[in-house]
Amino acid sequence: MLMLRAAGMFLVALGCIWALQGIGLLSWPADSFMLGDRGWVLRGIGAVAAGAALMALVEWRRRR
């Protein structure tokens, strides 16, 4: 279960980076192909949602 929780946390962090780069708020690295591309905002939101769902599933299984 620890690995699934870590994977969920990784997806949330990665999704936040993707979304912020897509919006243009995170300009690192400066030559990234993701900067200002709205498609990465949607991918980032999807990754955050998947990571949150994975962490919620782990928590639900732990309490069960």
Image: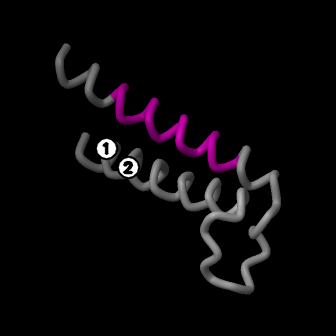
Q: How is the image coloured?
A: one colour
Q: Residue at x 26, y 22 (%)?
A: 61
Q: Nearer the viewer, residue 20 or 9?
A: 20
Q: Please, which residue is most extreme toward the top here?
A: 64
Q: Are marks 2 and 1 in contact (CB under 8 Å)?
A: yes
Q: Residue at x 79, y 64 (%)?
A: 36
Tell me, yes or no, whether the highlighted magenta stretch contains residue 54. yes
Q: Is residue 60 above or below residue 38?
A: above
Q: Residue at x 47, y 41 (%)?
A: 51
Q: Quadrant of the N terminus?
A: top left
Q: Is residue 6 left or right of residue 21?
A: left
Residue wearing tag 1? 5
Q: In the rendered image, which quarter is residue 54 located in?
A: top left
Q: Which residues are magenta?
A: 43-57
Residue 16 location (% of width, % of height): 54, 53
Q: In the rendered image, which quarter is residue 32 located in?
A: bottom right
Mark toward the viewer: 2 or 1: 2
Q: Nearer the viewer, residue 64 or 49?
A: 49
Badge 2 local density, few (<14 within 10 Å), some, or many (20+)?
some
Residue 62 location (% of width, % of height): 19, 25
Residue type at mark 1 is Arg
Residue type at mark 2 is Met
Residue wearing tag 2? 9
Q: Secondary structure at mark 1?
A: helix
Q: Residue at x 41, y 45 (%)?
A: 8
What is the chief secondary structure element of the magenta stretch? helix
Q: Nearer the viewer, residue 60 or 33?
A: 33
The Cα–Cα distance between marks 2 and 1, rounded to whole angstroms, is 6 Å
Q: Which mark is residue 64?
A: none
